[in-house]
Every structure is written in C-alpha cells, then in structure tokens.
Amino acid sequence: MATLAMQAGAEIDGFTIGERVHRGGMATLWSVTHPGITVPLLMKVPLTSEGEDPAAIVSFEMEQMILPRLSGPHVPACFGTGDFERQAYVVMERIPGQTLYKRLGELPMPYEEVRVIGGKVATALASLHRQNVIHHDIKPSSIMFRARGEAVLIDFGLSHHRHLPDLLQEEFRLPYGTAPYMAPERLLGVRDDPRSDLFSLGVLLYFFTTGVRPFGETESLRGMRRRLWRDPYPPRELKPDYPLWLQEIVLRCLEIDPVARYPTAAQLAFDLGHPDQVKLTARAQRLSRDPLTTVWRRRFNLGAVPPRPKSDVAAQLASSPIMAVALDIGEGAEALNDTIRVTAERVLSTSPSARLACVNVLKLNRLAIDRTHDEQGQNKHVDRLVALQHWARPFGLEEGRLTVHVLEAIDPAAAILEFAALNLVDHIIIGARQNSLRRALLGSVSARVAGEAPCTVTVVRPSRLASQADGGEGDEAAEQAANAAATPPVVF
Amino acid sequence: MRLALFADIHANRQAFAACLDAARARGAERLNCLGDIVGYGADPEWAVDTVMDLVAKGAVAVRGNHDNAIGVPSDSMNAEAQAAIDWTRGRLSGEQKQFLAELPMSREEDNRLYVHSEASEPTKWRYVRDTADAARSMMATGLQITFCGHIHRPGLYSMSSTAKMTSFVPTSGIAVQLLPGRRWLAVLGSVGQPRDGDPAASFAMFDTVSREITFHRVPYDVATAAARIKANGLPHWLADRLPLGR
C-alpha cells in the first residue's frame, strides 16, 4: 500500500493537513481544513507500519464503515474517508474540549453531577443503539460534551453494527477492549448485546461516584473473568451516604446477566432523569456483596448456563419502548380514558419490557403568578398523581415499569412534546375529544402532538357508537362540554 | 459501473422479471448471471433467451450445475431435480442447449471472480456453507472479490491480510463497502428458488467505484410461478417450496 506523506501543509482529497493533535496507540489525529467546510475538522490516520498492533487496522476499518452511517448530535459528524489503497483516514468534526478522562482527578464527584453526566451518556447511547450500533468501548476517554451539553461518543473502532460484517468477530482470540469497563458477556464472545454498553456506563457511574473501580484495574483474562461470578461491593458499603436510588441504578447496570440490567439505554436515561421515581428493590439496600454460596453457585454453574439465542439489537429495543400516555383526568374523561387504557393494554401486551409513563398537564394560567395559589396548586398536583396511579392500576405493571408525571405548563401540547423529547419516548398515546367546546376554543392538543412529536403517536377516540351511548353527541354533548368548561381547568 | 448480479434463476420467469425490473430501476448498467439459469422452474426457454440477450449486450454469465446437467447428465441430483432437468431438456432448442453447454465455469473481470459454486474446484459444485468453505474458495483465487451462488442463501465473507475470517448474513437494502484491505466472497441468494426462509427473490447490486455491495429482496408473483410448475407436470414439491422459501 502506498502511503502519502502525512505532514503539515500536505493535501489529501482536498483536505489540507494542519498540526498533529494527538498520537495514540492505534491512530494519529491531525487538524485539517477544507475550503467548503466551516466546522473544525480532525483527520484520524491509523498506525499501519511494521510492528504496529494489527488491531489498529481492523478497528480502523470498523470505524471507517460505521462512522459515516451515524448521525445526530451524539457522534462527531463524518466528512470523508480514505482507504488503505492510498492513505487510510477518516475526517470528522472536531469536538472542542476534553474527554471525561481529564476529570479523573476530581473523583469522587458529587452524586448530582454524576447523575447528570450519566443521563447525558445514556441518552447518547440510546441514540447510538437506535442506529443499530453498539459502542463496546464506553469509558471516560471516549466521552466528550458539546457546548450545548449533549454527550458525544467517539472512537468506534471496537463497535458492532447490526447491518455490517463484524470484522472483529474472529480477529482476536481475547476480547478486545478496556478491561475495567468490559461487560462479562464480552468475555464469552458475545458482541451483539447493546446492554454491554449499559454495563460499561454502570462501571463509569460507580467509579465517578466512589472513586473506586468496581472490578479493579486487572488486565489479565483470569482477573477479568471474576466478574462473571463475583459482584462488586455495593457503593453504600464504601459510602454510607450513597443515595438508595443511585445504588439501585448503578447495581442494575452492573448485573452479571444482561437480562437483569435495564432493557434499553433510554430506560436507564429515564431513571437518571427521574431519581425520585426509581423503583427501589433489594439492590438499593444492600450493604455487602453476595454471600460466597451464591458466588460459588454462579461460578461453578457457568458451563451449565444454556447458550443464549443471538440477541437482535432492533428487536430488543423494539420490545422495550418507553410509552407515554397523556391523560385528561377531569370530569367526563372516563369514557375516553377507558378507551385509552384498552389501546395501551394492546401495545403493552406485545412489548414485554415496555415502560409506561402516565402524563397529565396541569394547565397554568398565563397571568397567575399568585403566591396564594401555591397551597392549592400543590394539592392539585398530588391529587393528579394519585389519579394517574389509579388509572394505571389495572395494568398490574410492576412498579419499576410505571411512572406518573404531572407537568405544569401554559401550553399542554408543548409540554407533552417536550416531555417526549427529553425522555426519549418511543410512543405517545393521547385521546382526542369529539365535539368538544373546549377543543373548538383551544385547538386540538392531540392534533398538534401527532403533528410535531419526535416519535409514533396513537390518537385514541372512543368509537362513535360508544360516544353516542355516553351522550357524546348532540345536545347532551354540548351540555357536557359546557359543564366541563365550567369546571376548573382540565387539560386537553 | 453498477453491476446487477443474479444467481440461481432456475427458470422462474416471475421472479427473474421482477429482479430485472428492480435492478434496472436501481441503475444497473450490466446484468451478470452466476449460473443455474434453468432447472426446477417452468419457463426455461424464456430464462435462457433473456440471459442470452444480456450476454449479447456484454454481460458475464457462468455455468451452474443445472445448466451443465442439460448436456452432461448428472448422477448426483435428487429425483425432483432430475425430473425437472429431463423435462427442461425437451423444452430447449439446440441453440439454447449449446449456449448453456458453452458457458464458462468461471470468469475474471478486473479484481472480480464470477463462479457458480466454491471456487477451488468449480466442477465439483461445492457449496459455500461456512467460513472454512469460504476460506478455501478465497485461497484459490488471487482476485479480491468473488461472487458465487449455488447454496440459495445469501452470505458475505471476508478474509483479513492475516487470514482471519468473518461471516455475515447481509441485510436487504443496506450497502456494505467491500474494503480494499481484505478479500471478500459474496454468496448470492437465489432469484428463482430462495431457501433461507424468505420467499422473496434475491439479487445484489455492486458498484465498482464505491465498492459497495447491496443485497436486495424482491417480492414477486409466487402463486403464478408455482401454478406454472404444477401445470407443466413438474414435481409438486418444486412448486410448494416456493411460498415457503425453503
């Protein structure tokens, strides 16, 4: 292979080479410019000369295949690739600032700060997994942040793409990656489970909040294999003030069996975004590691574990959606809410790991900044939470899969849309009123949500027959609507 | 140049016509055929004429074991395949039979090899079932990319410069760049008799400039193809397996 001279001032495919920014074990980074591109650029060039690690070439090939297919704010934008025939390179957006690695000196960090960082990284992982890619090397040095705050994942050299050949499949006899962060199933050769990334993020959350790596720094295969049976010390054993909800989240990420972890990064992000709603299990309370009997059972039953069927990234993500049901809980909404429940049941029955977020908007008066309403407002808020819980009870969902939210907002549609975007909601179910006076006055919330939502929206409407039986049409409907209009503000 | 690649057409007119349309709609400039134009299906005359026409326009076509069995009776075929071959022989003209008999066993073009089966000994009609078969096939050629068929299930294999193998079941409609740093073996699915559980016809497109291969699945009129097999007195299993894709 002919290699062009990589030096400042040289030009490759229209990119002018600037200074060398970084030289790592696998690749060199150069700052480059291109006349047609205004964002700062980096050119990544693999080390391919004699005596270099052969992994450098393979992981570069993977990155070269995967990066151009990724989009969104959570990855560096890709501007071009060159192959090994002439000069192998990838040109990508240069993300300003440092990776999280630079902050290791600050550990342990405050819980709240780590919660926010973790939520951003989980959101970035959700975006990546939805693009059919598993990162497989989540660690502080592969995480950066945009000025606006979004986490950006870098380095896709060990990644797996569901729709592309996995060049690392048989390349290395030992699992390749960063030992302290590697999920246990990776040691068994599994490369197609997105929950491996959640394990790595769990290691990072544990490390950043305690200052201690949950599985140490061992690099030997023998040392790494311990995590197949040995659980880490619960954070509360190290730090008595460790929040219960945070230990619940971290230990769930670090479960040995991927099935016991969060089913998706989006669901993990959801819990990190709503710590007060995290369902606490025995995990949250633990003060010591599993007893030796449990550990030994795990260790010596390893071979007895039946081989898992190949996991399908897309199928798994699809079976674990976050559903938001927008509910009106005022008088006269029962018929519609019953219909919404039937629809939600149908969706839940096909998605065994779905999460249900019940949302109600408490509409604020545009002018009411009146302190005297605080007490009453607070009560209203609690009343609605209770009503949402009551509505969802027939689903019989275990608590970890159900959350309730009362959003206070002037614009109900905007509030629902924002909730859906922030919480990576996959599917909104919302009711539409028929012949409602209020709808005529306020415009249709459901129509706006359906039109502008970042995800699937199901608009539920009781069948005409049912609404007739309920007096949904004609004079009675007008009367009902008038009554409803007279009651305190009910939303949508 | 954008190439379309068809393997194992097996005289299925409905499937082949649907694939030709799909390939032309995707800008195919040359339509190459990887063998087994005939056998199993009820429209061998049309299938052979169509490929002869493509070859006259510059396409590459190689010989498959069913094409071969028209002129050289095979003793390794099962009863149904043999019945279809005997029936087909009676349907083809002398010119069509000669075309099949004169098809090359393999063809080279730039850095690409076209062959019906595993390439180490094409006349043995071996299948590429796994990475070991793929490695043997790739070792037998100095060319970077091999296209073959024969097994009726799409697959994509690669071999690194240190002889490490990868295997992959391609996703329909997703382009994969055949990176220049390694060798590749693309196993085409079958146009006329898919056996991977998906009854839709299978073909692939390859762009010689971007080096991207895209496998495609094309739904076609299975009912008519199956009905024609039965109407012509061919073994019913050859019709019944079409909607099952096996």
Image (spheres, grey):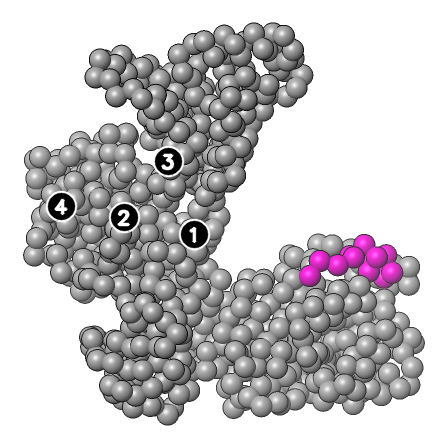
Mark 4–mark 2 distance (CA, rounded to whole Å): 16 Å
Q: Nearer the viewer, mark 3 or mark 2?
A: 3
Label disc, if present, on residue A209 of the rendered structure: 4
Query: Dot 3 corresponds to which residue?
Result: A419
Label disc, if present, on residue A120 of the rendered structure: 2
Mark 4–mark 3 distance (CA, rounded to whole Å): 28 Å
Is residue A465 toward the left or the right of residue A478 in the image? right
Which quadrant holds residue A237?
top left
Dot 1: what SS?
Answer: helix
Q: Disc 4 is attached to a residue of which chain?
A: A
The majority secondary structure of the magenta stretch comes to helix
Q: Disc 3 is attached to a residue of which chain?
A: A
Q: Amino acid at mark 1?
A: Arg
- The percent position of residue B55, horizontal first and vertical second, equals 76, 85
- Magenta-highlighted residues: B218-229
Dot 3 or dot 1: first in sequence order is 1
Which residue is rendered at x = 37% and y = 92% of the image? A2
Mark 3–mark 1 distance (CA, rounded to whole Å): 19 Å
Is residue B130 toward the left or the right of residue A246 in the image? right
- Label 4 close to label 2 by CB (< 8 Å): no
Which residue is rendered at x = 55% and y = 88% of the image? B111
